[in-house]
Amino acid sequence: MMRRLARPFAIIGLVAAIVGAVGGITLRIVDPVPVVPNTFGFTDISLLSFEFLGVTFTSVGALLMIRRPENAVGW
């Protein structure tokens, strides 16, 4: 039962993360707002790195959910 539910959840979550990352990058390219200088120094490279990390973590979680659906880390 758990394995049957894990695959659709994993795929939907991974697709949502990829669509969100591509959408964020697309919006940044289409409507480039000026980067306001701030204390932390976030730039467009920061956006790319945060989205890369988000998709990477989602991919690992999806892989865990598909391969080991009883593992709580994937969920």
Image (tube, helix red, strand yellow):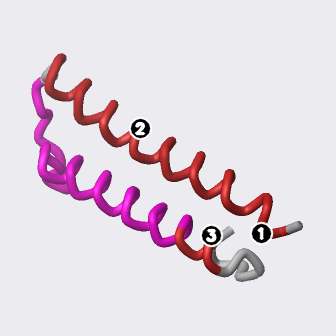
Residue at numbered disc 2: 20
* Residue 29: mark in rendering: none
Marks 3 and 2: CB-CB under 8 Å? Answer: no
Mark 2 is on which residue type?
Answer: Gly
Of the residues under marks 3 and 2, which one precedes in the sequence?
A: 2
Mark 1 is on which residue type?
Answer: Arg
Residue at numbered disc 1: 3
What kind of element bears circle 2?
Answer: helix
Q: Nearer the viewer, mark 3 or mark 2?
A: 3
Q: Is residue 68 left or right of residue 46?
A: right
The residue carrying pointer 3 sits among few (fewer than 14), some (14 to 19) or many (20 or more) residues within 10 Å by Cα, namely many
Q: How far separated are the C-alphas under marks 1 and 2?
A: 26 Å
Farthest residue in the top direction?
31
Q: Residue at position x 68%, y 68% from top?
A: 75
Quarter in which the N terminus is drawn: bottom right
The residue carrying pointer 1 sits among few (fewer than 14), some (14 to 19) or many (20 or more) residues within 10 Å by Cα, namely few
Whether residue 62 is situated above or below residue 15 in the rendered picture:
below
Residue at numbered disc 3: 66
What kind of element bears circle 3?
Answer: helix
Q: Is residue 3 left or right of residue 42?
A: right
Q: How far separated are the C-alphas under marks 3 and 2?
A: 21 Å
Range of residues picked out in magenta: 34-62
Q: Measured from the top left, where is residue 30 in percent x and y?
A: 17, 18
Quadrant in which residue 36 is drawn: top left
Q: Nearer the viewer, residue 9 or 1?
A: 1
Q: Residue at position x 72%, y 62% from top?
A: 6
Whether residue 20 is situated above or below residue 4 in the rendered picture:
above
